[in-house]
């Protein structure tokens, strides 16, 4: 890993939060992700499953965490199973966690090698009545590909059919959505690295550069600051491309007079940042571009004030829609007749602003959290309104990452990154 060590107290506290919501006589099992194959002997870079990472800090393949607070043997209340390391593995793959370094990482004292898992689990299962399994229940998840966790659950239920199986997901969604200060600090680090990428683009942008060159400049800055790279596939869309919500080809030349929409964020210690900024290729917005830009910024500024404890996300998005409707009227993009004749399920403003305004962010870019419970202090959200006008080759979206506070407006983790139109022009022309 490129990132610096993280205080194991975070993972100790996270496990306590999970245990507090477990039923008696229950154990829970969490698996690492697979290393996914491409073809031949090629693989994707390893990305750890966020749940075992959240509970243990173990950022390594072929790892299993078992939590069994009511275990008869105190050594079984928290157990890590790891791939046994060796000098040969260290030479070919690099150092893996030893039992000692696993404790320093996680705070878990009981560490076994993976080959001992079946014997140790049989002992624990004989005492347990309930088993928490870790299925992927993110509302936007595509679960077509069977994961290591999926295979494990399938085999476990065949081997131990008499146990009661329960879901870890509701607990994990609840506890992961409220960030600890250590997590907020790591997210701030990710945002600070993103800020360096923004500054590099401000210095680099000019007519004739290619979208992929901008992407390369950003990646260079990320890697030299201990980031593993982009938290998600970056969007670098100039002109009409900015109107394609998930444009990721990044293969067109940026032309004088166009605006470039850039949606990117650094990952640090597996925590995501998620930013969107729009820069004029020539260093100055036209009057029309600035008017649209300022409308989006106004909606964003007012929307942030709504991200406070007690707010329901459905109500929040409805209020944001009303803010956007007012701006689109002012820009002449819709009129009162459009509003009068609109389909309530798809309001008139959706023609130019067709996506949601905020999502949870944390270990995942689209992080887990409840969409039916009120917002809590410690929740972290993006705020990203946009206006997309294909007939004008203009798309504007602005996005920052925010942490909900107990009182007052949320804290903006990206408050140091230029966002005012004039500030961007000044930075590009200084």
Image (spheres, rainbow, N blue to C red):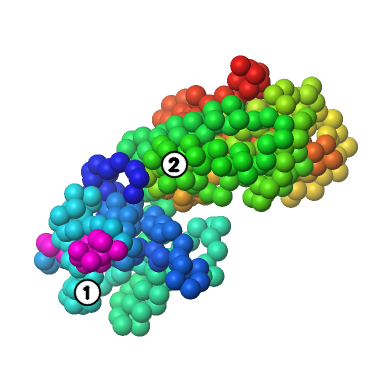
Q: Is residue 64 above or below residue 221?
A: below
Examine the structure image and report whether residue 7 is included in the region drawn in magenta: no
Q: Position of residue 197 (x, y in %)?
A: 52, 34
Task: Name the residue at 72% across, 26% down.
Answer: 282
Comparing 80 with 282, the one in front is 282
Q: Nearer the viewer, mark 2 or mark 1?
A: 2
Task: Name the residue at 40% across, 48% down.
Answer: 270
Q: Is residue 349 above or below residue 417?
A: below
Comparing 181 with 274, the one in front is 274
Task: Name the residue at 54% across, 38% down.
Answer: 218
Comparing 142 with 268, the one in front is 268
Question: Residue 163 sits in which quadrant?
Answer: bottom left
Left or right placement of residue 380 versus residue 124 in this view: right
Q: Judging from the image, what secondary structure is the residue with disc 2 in?
A: helix
Residue linked to disc 2: 223
Quadrant showing the C terminus: top right
Does the image show residue 327? Answer: no
Q: Give the alpha-carbon distance from disc 2 to disc 1, as whole Å.
A: 36 Å
Q: Is residue 123 above or below residue 194?
A: below
Labels 2 and 1 touching (C-beta < 8 A): no
Left or right placement of residue 259 versus residue 266 in this view: right
Over which residues does the magenta segment extend?
74-92
Residue linked to disc 1: 115
């Amino acid at each position: 890993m490129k990132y610096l060590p993280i205080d194991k107290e975070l993972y100790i506290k996270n496990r306590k939060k999970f245990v507090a919501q477990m039923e008696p006589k229950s154990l829970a099992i969490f698996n690492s992700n697979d290393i996914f194959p491409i073809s031949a002997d090629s693989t994707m870079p390893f990305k750890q499953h966020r749940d075992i990472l959240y509970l243990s800090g173990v950022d390594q393949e072929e790892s299993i965490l078992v939590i069994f607070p009511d275990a008869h043997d105190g050594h079984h209340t928290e157990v890590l199973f790891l791939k046994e390391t060796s000098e040969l593995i260290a030479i070919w793959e690099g150092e893996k966690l030893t039992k000692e370094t696993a404790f320093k990482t996680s705070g878990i004292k009981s560490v076994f090698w993976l080959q001992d898992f079946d014997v140790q689990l049989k002992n624990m299962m004989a005492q347990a009545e309930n088993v928490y399994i870790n299925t992927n229940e993110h509302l936007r998840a595509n679960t077509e590909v069977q994961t290591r966790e999926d295979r494990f659950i399938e085999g476990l239920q065949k081997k131990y059919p008499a146990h009661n199986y329960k879901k870890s997901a509701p607990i994990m969604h609840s506890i992961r959505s409220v960030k600890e200060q250590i997590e907020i600090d790591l997210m701030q680090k990710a945002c600070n690295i993103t800020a360096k990428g923004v500054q590099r683009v401000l210095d680099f942008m000019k007519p004739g550069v290619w979208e992929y060159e901008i992407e390369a400049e950003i990646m260079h800055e990320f890697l030299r600051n201990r980031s593993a790279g982009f938290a998600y596939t970056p969007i670098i869309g100039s002109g009409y491309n900015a109107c394609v919500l998930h444009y990721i080809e990044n293969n067109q030349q940026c032309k004088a007079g166009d605006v470039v929409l850039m949606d990117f964020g650094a990952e640090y210690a597996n925590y995501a940042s998620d930013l969107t900024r729009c820069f004029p290729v020539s260093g100055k917005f036209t009057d029309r571009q600035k008017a649209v830009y300022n409308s989006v910024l106004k909606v964003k500024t007012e929307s942030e004030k709504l991200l406070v404890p007690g707010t329901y996300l459905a109500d929040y998005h409805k209020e944001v829609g009303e803010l956007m409707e007012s701006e689109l009227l002012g820009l002449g993009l819709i009129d009162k007749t459009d509003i009068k004749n609109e389909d309530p399920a798809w309001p008139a403003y959706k023609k130019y602003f067709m996506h949601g305004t905020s999502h949870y962010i944390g270990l995942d870019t689209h992080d887990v959290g409840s969409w039916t419970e009120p917002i809590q202090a410690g929740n972290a959200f993006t705020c990203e309104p946009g206006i997309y006008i294909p007939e004008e080759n203009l798309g504007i979206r602005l996005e920052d990452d925010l942490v909900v506070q107990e009182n007052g407006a949320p804290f903006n983790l990206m408050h140091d990154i230029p966002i005012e139109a004039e500030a961007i022009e000044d930075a590009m022309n200084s």
